[in-house]
Every structure is written in C-alpha cells, then in structure tokens.
Amino acid sequence: MSSLDYFLQLAVNGVVTGGVYALVALGLTLIFGVLGIINFAHGEFYMLGAYLGLVLVMRLGAPFFVALPLAMAGMALGGIVAERLVFRRLRRTDPTQSILSAFGLAIALQTAALQIFGPQPAVIRTAFGATPVAFAGVHLTLQRLLIPFLAAALVLLFHLLVRRTWMGLSLRAVAQNPATASLMGIDVNAVAAATFAIGTALAAGAGVLMGSVFLMQPTMGSMVVLKSFTVVILGGMGNVYGAVGAGVLLGITESLTAGFLTNDFKDILAFLVVVLVLLLRPAGLFGQQVERQSL
Amino acid sequence: MKRALEGGTIVALVAVPWLFPDAYVVHVMVVVFIFSILATGLDLVMGYCGQFSFGQAAFYGIGAYTSALLVRDLGAPFWVTLPASTLVAAAFGALLGIPAVRLAGHFLAVTTIAFQVIVTLVLTQWHGFTGGTAGITGIPSPPPIHALGRTWVSFDSPQGYYHLSLVVALVVVTLARRLTTTRLGQEWLAVREDELLAKTLGINTTKVKLLAFTLGAALAGTAGSLIAHYLRNVHPSEFTIWTSAEIVAMVILGGRGTFLGPILGALVLTTLPEYLRFAKDYKLVLFGLTLIVMTAFLPQGVLGGLRRLRDRTGAA
C-alpha cells in the first residue's frame, strides 16, 4: 500500500466518524443557538438512538433504512418529553441550572441504559456491513461508505427544514430574540419542543449510523458529547454550518493523527485544539466575531 | 450563641467514630470531608469570583497523582506529599487561569471542560508515568505520630484517618472563610457582580480571577492528597468530568457564595446514594432524577431555600 493510498484510506475513515460528529454537534449547537441551553445529556440521546436502532434491527428484524427514521422519530419524542419535563422551567434562568439538570438527566439515562441493555458491547449488523467496496485504492464496507452520504442527506434535510419552512422561520426568530418572536405571535414553547425534537433526532440518527459500524456501549455518549462541545466552539457557537464543517474536519484530523502519529493522542486532540483556538481565534474557525468576553 | 453552635458541631464531629462505631459511617464521613474541601475550593471560583469551572476534579486528580508519584518514585512521606500536592495543583490552577481569565460564559465553561478531559486522558493514557487505567497502588497511610516513647495517633484505621481528614478539612475550610472576608474576597464579589465596574474602580480583575483559580485548585490538590493516602491507591476513573460535575452540583445545590453551602452540598450529595440504596441497581437513576428536581425547586440551593422559607415565615 503506497503512502498516498494510506493517507486516502485514513481520510475516508475520518469522514465516516466526522459525519457522525457533525450530526451530534449540529443538534447541540441548534439547541444552544435557539434556547441557550448547553445540553450535557445530548450524548445520551445519541446513545439511546443507537440502542433503539439495535432493538429495531436485531430484535424486531426491521431493515436498516426503516430503523433509521423510526429511531430518529422515537428519540424526537424523547427530546420533546425532556424539554417539557426538565428544561422548560429553566429556560430563563442562570445557565448553570440547565447544565446541572442536563447532568442529572445524563446520569439517569446512562445508568438506566446500563441496567436495561447491560455493559456488553453490541453492534447493528446489516447486509451492507458485509459488502466490501474499493475505489481509488481505498477499501471499506458499503455500510461505512453509506454513513457520510446519509449524514449529508440529514444535514440537507435539516437545512430545508430551517430555511424553507414556517417552523424553521420561527426557530430562527426565537434564536434572534425570544421576546420579539413571541410578540410576533410565535409560540415559543412549541418552538422549544421542535428544537429539541430536531436536535435529539439528529443525535439519534448519528447514534444509529455509528452503531452500525462501531461497537456501542451505554457509556458511548460521554466522549462524543464532550468532543461535540469542542466542535460547537470550533464551528462558532450557534453556527450550524460551522459545526458541520468542524465536525468533519475533526473526524479527518483524528484519523490522520491515529494513523501517522499514535492512537493514544487521537482523543486528546480536539481538546488541545479548542484551548489553543480559544486563545488565538476566539470566534471559532468559521465564526464571525461574537462577544466572547464579558468586557 | 453562634460560637457555641460552632463549638458544639466540632465536638459532635470529633465524637462521630465513638457514637457510630460502624466503619462504614466513618468511611462515608471521610469522603464527605474530602468533598467539602473540593466544594469549598470551587466555591471560591464559582460562588465568590463568579467564574464558571468544570475542572475541579482535574486538580483533585493532579493532587492525588502528585502524592502517588512522590511516594512511588521518591518514597516521600505524607507530611511532604500533602503540601506538595497542594502546590502542584495550585500551579496547574494558575496555568488554566491564563486562558480562563480572558474568557467568559460558555467559552470559559468549554475551556475548563477541555482542560478536565485533557487531564483525564493523560492520566489514563500515559501508562509509563501514571500507570494508565490500572492507576497507582501501594500508597501508604500517613506515618503514626510517636513521641515520648509511645504512639499517640495512628492513621491506618478509618477512625484514625477520620480525625486526620477532619482536622485538615477544618483548617482548610476556616482559612477559605477567612480569605473571603479579606480585601481579596471583597474584590472577588465585585468581579462577580459587575466586572466592568470592578475594573473601573481600579481592581486588577485579571490578577483577582487568576488568584481565585489558583487557590480553588490548591484546595483540590489538598483533597487529592488526602484521598490518595486514604484509599492507598489512585485510579483515573475517580477524576473525570463526572466528578467535576458532581462538585459543581454540590456548590450550586448547597448554596454558592456561602460558607456552609458547599459543605452542606458535599454532605447531601455524598450521602444521597446511601439513602437511595433501596433502589439497588437503579440508585444512580434516582440520583440523577433527584438532581433535576433539586435544581428545579431549589435554584438558590438548600441554604437559599431555607433563607427564603425563613423570610416568608418571618414576614407572616
């Protein structure tokens, strides 16, 4: 294998995980942008989405392309319930309150999942997972190849939803100014529910995609949500397309680091980069100037 | 009256190992003392200076590993490792302070989260130095105190360690309380209430915030040394973002910016899982749900809630 082939192989692998990071970060930054909530439990929605996909495919025998939207819809409902029960009453309070509640929710969901699904790793097996594909010297399974395309399709769907529909317009209005939006007759509670539904559905979709190529465990959400925080910052807080770009970039960089340097360094990378970027370029890699300082 | 109450509390705390000979009660109380130190340290940063930090468990881990490494590589005794851990953690606190003093709000939160994760990953993955996921074992208890031909105190039993950690916690917490009444404490409050105004008044806000991060981390380093010599091993899973979040919860739910709040928070959240033991495997699920309910109904913490109750009954 030539070194160019090796580079390409690593880059393609990186795009696969990067697509998943992008989807998780997209939901996280959407919930932050519209509602100002840092949702620590977002990784748990990703994890539950993966397990919902597992149950649908492996226990109930649903085809992968049916399980993916079903798991997303199921978790969207879960997101609406979480918003109603946990986050609604905290919307206009100190941000530490919503962070703490989200932390409580994350503990509850993760430990419940541990009891229900057990600690042993599992994976969603699909027919595409056994189909090898090769192009330009790169080898991967059809299932892996599908992930970037499905992730891109979900981002496109999200784009259309936010840019071309009334709901999207109300979402953007609330993001700009909730008080004015509600004066214009927008139901802010409905928008909050919709925001959580979309955000958790994206996380669940990412979970199902990841769970079809990598082993899933009830603790899988913790590291992903922490990395997604860095992706959100790197993409510019609340900037949805920045988050997508930064997510894909992180996936590729991690894969190249693991391949050319050391696997140990892979996970730490995102966090070192975010500290450096905040020191040098506080608005994020793709962000326009935002107020980051209190002064 | 207040003095009498304080004295009574201290006497009661000293007597706990004789009142409750159950070794488990004593063990839980040692953990409560250690977390009281951690939460009091974080309260200097969050409660008084108003700076958000999700990295307290990182400094706790740095303190614990400093002690463990000094023992493993140099055979240093507890009386050396305790101050050394405090100083090393303080130095790392200043290091985090350098980017942190320039940031605010969510950016500060994410920077401290990043710092916390970096420390956890280094502890987990630098096998040659930190022992990796296996951690470091074989840390001895503090040496017993001999004088005049007899042993006065030994620390290898939970009872012995109970009194040691009680004394350290009392000293540290009292020093922290004294600190908040000094000029520096007043300047922290000024920064918390209005940073721009504080600057206008001639307060060096950068220095003041840096000191908050450094001192908060120093306390965590002390706590880390205590836990290392108590459990006699260190393990990276004790010092993750989850522990940091728990310490944040202790400060907020106890009552931030108060002396008793973080201690109360440490007591409630450390003993809560013990009360939830009836739920067996679902204990932590209930723990998470309790956090949600407490956050919703006690936004000012337990102390704030009590104060509101008192005001309401006082007014009626």
Image (spheres, helix red, strand yellow):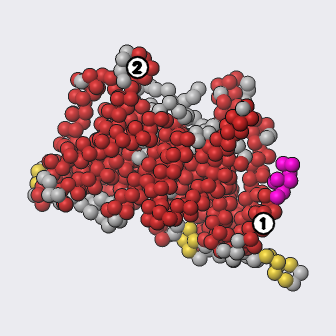
> Residue pushed farthest top?
A184
The residues colored magenta run: B1-8
Q: Which residue is drawn at 37% across and 61% down?
A: A114
Asked if labels 1 and 2 share a chain, the reply is no
Secondary structure of the residue carrying tag 2 is: helix
Image quadrant in which you'd find residue A246: top left
In the shown orientation, is residue A6 left or right of residue A121?
Answer: left
Residue closer to the observer: A117 or A121: A117
Q: Residue at x 76, y 57 (%)?
A: B170
Image quadrant in which you'd find residue B32: bottom right
| Amino acid beneath label 1 | Val
What x and y, as percent, mark residue A158? 25, 33
Residue B133, relative to residue A132: is it above or below?
below
Residue A258 lies in the magenta-colored region: no
Image quadrant where one finds the C terminus of chain B: top right
Residue B5 lies in the magenta-colored region: yes
Q: Residue at x 66, y 74 (%)?
A: B22
- Circle on res. A182: 2
Residue closer to the observer: B305 or A40: B305
Callout 1: residue from which chain?
A: B
Which residue was labeled with disc 1?
Answer: B14
